[in-house]
Amino acid sequence: MKAIYIKNIASRLGLQTWQVENCIQMFQEGDTIPFISRYRKEKTGGLDDVEVASVKHYAESFEEMEKRKATILETIASQDKLTDDLRSKIEACLESTELEDLYLPYRPKRRTRATVAKEAGLEPLADKLWSFESRDPRREAAAFVGDKVPDADAALQGARDIVAERFSETPALRDTLRRIFRTLSVSGKATKAAADSQDADKYRAWMGHSEPLKNIPSHRLLAMLRAQEEGFLNISLTTDAVKCCNKLYYDFCQERRYPSPAVAEQLKEALADAFDRLMEPSISNEIIKEAKEKADKEAIRIFGENLRQLLLQPPVGQLRTMAIDPGFRNGCKIACLDETGRLLHHEIIFPHPPQSEKIKAMTRLGAMVEQYGIQAIAIGNGTASRETEKFVKMTHLPASCKVYVVSEDGASIYSASEVAREEFPNEDVTVRGAVSIGRRLMDPLSELVKIDPKSLGVGQYQYDVDQNALKQELDETVEACVNKVGVNLNTASPYLLRYVSGLGPALSKSIVEYRDAKGGFNSREELLKVPRLGAKAYEQCAGFLRIRGGKNPLDNSAVHPETYHIVSKMAKDLGVATEELVGNEKLCASIKPSDYVTADFGLPTITDVLKELAKPGLDPRGAAADFAFCEDIHSIEDLQPGMELPGIVTNITAFGAFVDIGVHEQGLIHISKFGRRIASPSEVVKLHQHITVEVTDIDFDRKRISLKFCK
């Protein structure tokens, strides 16, 4: 990659050029973001996965820009208009807008008014106006009257059309206009379609609304743009044509002598036409698009962070679990799972109206808990959740069997998916949905990777933002989470394995097929026997895969096989076997990291190795905590302002956090209700965090609950 791009990336991200250069080189060699951030810290200076991903994004953008430059240079050269100066300017571009401005005069275009004027032979007259050489434009225009030009007025009009196009294609003037437009306000005006449409009611707040573009929050702009997309709102910038044209004319004239009054009149008229017809529409759209891209980035960032928190929820672990998908008329669907999430049994009980078979349901529930050795119960948080939770807690359960409420978001999507059909070809969607609820409690990460992240209920305007950018962010987030936690090679599903560094759908399928045929892996090295899994893929994935009870205890840690020889030397120097060193914090603390630094592995790697040896395979997610809603509050009618209630954060947006307080309707803590001035609610709360809130207002008609953060 060219030095100008590397230097620019480093400047944008606040990095050293060598860090960027090394990252780009490793990308070119096929290294992944998780592998680079964890196992190549010497080469990156300790960059984390987000920073490495940012380098990759910019590098890919500049690679696309370089291809675009090649196309532009070739096009201009084919017109015999490529000068050395123009080539240098194009090659030095770092912004796409600057590049496209330079290309604009040479871009193949449809037949325009300027084209017609040129065909009529009026370009020499336009040149005289443009260069201020004309003394009497009207007298000089008479010389161009002929078959294609009926009179002097037509000649001047044609010349102005040519000049107007030149104004619109002047990079400096376009850039000036962009700077002006970025300071303007964006306003929304209701369309005729909005007048009689109930669907437009949710957008009424933005009809007649005006706000500086630089200050408008991302969620508000996206809401206005959605209203425009649905035909209820027209969005525009509040431009002042006179002020804009005066500024453009001043900039155009300031580096040259001012023209005669007659020429100035022609130029100003051409500039006004250029602004109204060519510049304002395109640059206004460009600036609004630019603002949307900024809003998209913010919405995508929030979605990515929410997804990260969701996937890294603490698991209850390998416990025998009963999953309950609650319901009234259709009953509560129950699935009993073993320690690995395998379905043991399923049935339906009817503890609620209209059947109200409470005694029978309680008997069956207790029998299943005893028969299948249930250690944890997961209840979906949808319809009849509170009622089912109360019923379950009335049943005589072992003291060690805890009850958890689990988010159902996306469970119905999973149950009808191809993934679910492959896992449970002989079960219906209700059973699959219940199983998913139970597995989410056991290991949220392993289960949620099977579901499209956009269906998990943690986004903000996710269907309005750039879908390619959103997919890339979410895929990288899932990949980062999976590799942060690590994956059990002998139990992981192919849907989880595909996110492991260096793998993918094809290799994950091959791994599972090999595992099924051979009865499991005894070592990481055995991965090299998997068809089509070569040395590079092994290098990328090995450190993120775990083998419990394998031949080498290091295979159940994040220590990479490439540093096993260093661990062996440490153990030998201490006079113990490797098995004795792994997990022995006291022995690990006695080792001086600098003693094992080599030309290939520096202090950061050795420090990481020792940290992992002390606590091998430590799950970074912690342990799941149980939670209980207020027992006296079951519906919105039970609420009163001033009540303090326990709640669970279910979604975080730019404008606030949504909280489940157990009344079937989500409450909102507006960003202004967190007790202090903050830039984002994520500064105070995290997804699925257990918090205490105060009810400040209740709108019973619209079923809206306003909350204030307490603790």
Image (cartoon, rainbow, N blue to C red):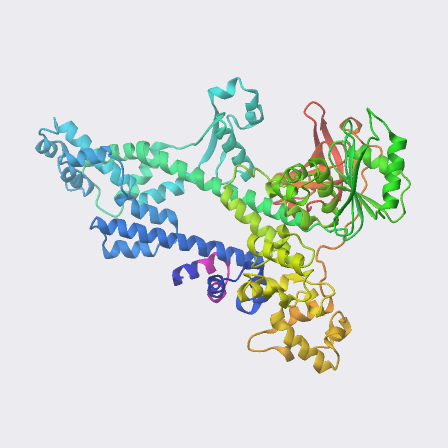
The quadrant of the rendering that contains the C terminus is top right
Image point (75%, 33%), residue name: 695
Image point (18%, 43%), residue name: 131
Q: Quadrant of residue 517?
A: bottom right
Relative to 87, residue 423 above or below = above
Image point (8%, 29%), residue name: 146
Does the image show residue 429? yes
Looking at this view, name the residue that lies furthest to the front: 517
Report x, y in % for residue 446.
67, 50
Closer to the camera, 244 or 443? 443
Closer to the camera, 657 or 598? 598
Report x, y in % for residue 295.
52, 41
Decide if residue 431 is on the left or right side of residue 598: right
Relative to 231, residue 711 above or below = below
Relative to 573, residue 683 above or below = above
Report x, y in % for residue 485.
67, 57
Q: Magenta segment range?
A: 9-20
Q: Quadrant of residue 349?
A: top right
Is 553 within the magenta? no
Q: Main SS of the magenta segment?
A: helix
Report x, y in % for residue 520.
69, 61
Relative to 84, residue 676 above or below = above
Decide if residue 302 is on the left or right side of residue 352: left
The quadrant of the rendering that contains the N terminus is bottom left
Q: Quadrant of residue 105?
A: top left
Closer to the camera, 636 or 554? 554
Looking at this view, name the residue that lies furthest to the top: 196
Does the image show residue 486? no
Decide if residue 333 is on the left or right side of residue 54: right
